[in-house]
Image: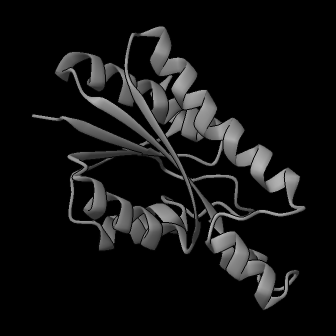
Amino acid sequence: MYDKILVPTDGSDTSEAAVEHAIDLAEKYGAEVHALYVVDTDSMSLSLGGEQLDRIEQGQFGEMDEVRERAESATGYVADRAAEHGLETVEHISAGRPHSQIDNYVESNGIDLVVMGSHGRSGVRRALLGSVTERTLRSTHAPILVVDVDRSE
């Protein structure tokens, strides 16, 4: 049923809870796990110039070591947890609007299921869902399992 499972991650506790669900499903279905970190260029646009944003969108972080380290740590966590269960993982870092990048990744990579947290690191938590999760639910044409860390334990 599921051959490729995508876990969009920002390294938050909620993302980590989603990883556990994705791994469980990947084990049951023999699926490949995909870890995606999206550098949210909308939230960075006020502090960065256009040229810097263009480089980030092309995967060239330049002197932005902190951003690269956060991204690699988040996708690395997914890969490490999956490896503990003998699962293959594809790690990918992109830049742009998170829900659009998730949708593009799903379409470009034949993803069968998206497993994501109900909310991430962003400041104010919405009543039910974070804005990235809500937008992804509206725009992505693949099944999406939403995990709430408060309810998944």
Q: What residue lies at 56% left-to-right and 46% top-to-bottom?
A: 9
Q: Position of residue 122 (x, y in %)?
A: 70, 61
Q: What residue lies at 49% left-to-right and 9% top-to-bottom?
A: 84
Tell me if I can see residue 12 in this picture. no
Q: Extreme bottom residue here?
A: 50
Query: Left of 51 or right of it: where is 135?
Result: left
Q: Nearer the viewer, residue 126 or 73?
A: 73
Q: Quadrant of residue 126?
A: bottom right
Q: Extreme left residue here?
A: 1
Q: Position of residue 66 (x, y in %)?
A: 86, 51
Q: What residue lies at 64% left-to-right and 60% top-to-bottom?
A: 125
Tell me if I can see residue 123 in this picture. yes
Q: Nearer the viewer, residue 80 or 25?
A: 80
Q: Position of residue 58 (x, y in %)?
A: 62, 71
Query: Left of 1 or right of it: where is 86?
Result: right
Q: Position of residue 138 (x, y in %)?
A: 31, 72
Where does the N terminus fall, quadrant-wise? top left
Q: Quadrant of residue 32?
A: top left
Q: What residue lies at 78% left-to-right and 86% top-to-bottom?
A: 51
Q: Quadrant of residue 42?
A: bottom right
Query: Left of 79 or right of it: where is 146?
Result: left
| 51 over 95 or under it: above or below | below
